[in-house]
Image (spheres, rainbow, N blue to C red):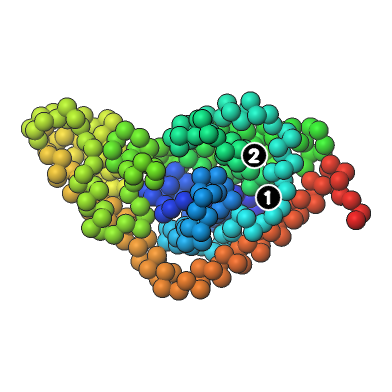
């Protein structure tokens, strides 16, 4: 029986972090045996906010690929490819631009949030506004059934399905409506406790952080601002240190004990954080080992990307043929 397809990816704007892992990467690793998996490195979309310095993209592409491989994405099971090297995606995006209005794009909650975060309100690049259309092209070029995403990306799946239904109604039922899959932790808070983990805010713990960097970040984490002394009863709910324990500490009895003692004022923040450091270093140890092995051979990274992109383009060409046929623009010349 033919496997269903899964498509997911990231913009190469810097290293990936623990929020990416719980939001999407963990599902990619878990499902790559069950789905025909395509993982896209969205370099063209990264230009929407890095257009002044495109020279950084090559380094970032390789770093993101290292992050993928280090968490356990297997290039023999998953097709890792570079978006801009599959021109059929851009061709689809041009077609889809006629199937969505500017007003609809401006209402997209994800776009609105990122516009505010990046300060684009008064000087919005057109490329940034239409990147949900480009994402729809990414997904449908591979006729994906499933798209692992963070919770904040669900509006993109909704917009993709609107475009798919519009196309299938106007022309012919060719495109697949994808389903979004959110990770076990819909949103991992940043180390500041106030926002989701974000590279632009600087409240992240990266998958590539070494033990010293990790310890510094954890020891500086926001906890319970109402708790002045270790003997004061503390709040566990909304406390990011405990959220991280829940996500990454496999010793559930230890976590339950820490919570109980914290609520009763019988354990200090330092002890709770030190146990989190142990849990995170244990989690990251195999990731660091795989990363070091792949990083030792940059040529291998490029070979994986070349092979993956060739495979991805073949599949996208098949979709583009179906789209042109449905629209009756498969010209004989």
Vertical side of 261 occupied by 305: above or below? below
Is residue 325 rendered to the left or right of residue 304? right
Is residue 176 rendered to the left or right of residue 20? right
Tag shown at residue 45? none
Could you say whether the residue bearing mark 1 is in a helix, strand or loop? helix
Choose between 12 and 319: the one closer to the eye: 12
Q: Quadrant of the N terminus?
A: bottom right
Percent position (x, y) of residue 329? 86, 46
Residue 30 at least partly seen: no
Residue for point 12% across, 38% down: 267
Which quarter of the figure has residue 245?
top left
Residue for point 28% across, 38% down: 192
Percent position (x, y) of residue 291? 40, 65
Could you say whether the residue bearing mark 2 is in a helix, strand or loop? helix
Residue 219 at least partly seen: yes
Percent position (x, y) of residue 298? 47, 71
Residue for point 63% across, 50% down: 5
Read off the residue under disc 2.
Answer: 133
Q: Mark 2 and mark 1 in contact (Cβ < 8 Å)?
A: no
Vertical side of 287 occupied by 9: above or below? above
- Name the residue at the right extreme: 332
Q: Earlier in the sequence, mark 1 or mark 2?
A: 1
Tag shown at residue 89? 1
């Amino acid at each position: 029986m033919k496997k269903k397809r899964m498509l997911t990816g990231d913009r190469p704007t810097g290293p990936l972090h623990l929020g990416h892992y719980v939001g999407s990467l963990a599902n990619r690793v878990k499902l790559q045996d069950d789905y025909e998996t395509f993982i896209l490195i969205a370099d063209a979309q990264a230009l929407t906010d890095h257009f002044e310095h495109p020279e950084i993209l090559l380094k970032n592409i390789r770093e993101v690929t290292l992050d993928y491989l280090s968490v356990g994405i297997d290039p023999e099971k998953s097709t890792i490819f570079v978006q801009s090297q599959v021109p059929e995606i851009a061709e689809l995006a041009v077609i889809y631009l006629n199937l969505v209005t500017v007003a609809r794009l401006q209402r997209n909650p994800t776009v609105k949030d990122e516009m505010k975060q990046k300060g684009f309100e008064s000087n919005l690049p057109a490329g940034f506004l239409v990147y949900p259309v480009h994402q729809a092209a990414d997904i449908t070029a591979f006729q994906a059934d499933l798209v692992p995403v963070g919770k904040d990306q669900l509006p993109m799946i909704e917009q993709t399905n609107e475009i798919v239904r519009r196309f299938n109604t106007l022309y012919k039922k060719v495109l697949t409506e994808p389903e979004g899959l959110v990770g076990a932790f819909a949103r991992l808070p940043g180390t500041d406790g106030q926002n989701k983990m974000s590279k632009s805010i600087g409240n992240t713990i990266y998958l590539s952080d070494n033990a010293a960097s990790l310890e510094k970040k954890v020891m500086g984490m926001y906890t319970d601002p109402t708790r002045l002394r270790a003997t004061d009863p503390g709040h566990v709910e909304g406390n990011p240190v405990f959220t991280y324990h829940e996500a990454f500490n496999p010793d559930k009895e230890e976590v339950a004990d820490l919570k109980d003692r914290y609520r009763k004022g019988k354990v200090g923040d330092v002890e709770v954080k030190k146990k989190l450091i142990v849990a995170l270093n244990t989690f990251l140890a195999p990731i660091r080992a795989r990363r070091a092995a792949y990083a030792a051979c940059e040529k291998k990274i490029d070979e994986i990307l070349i092979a993956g992109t060739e495979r991805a383009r073949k599949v996208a060409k098949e979709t583009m043929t179906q789209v042109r046929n449905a629209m009756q623009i498969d010209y004989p010349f």
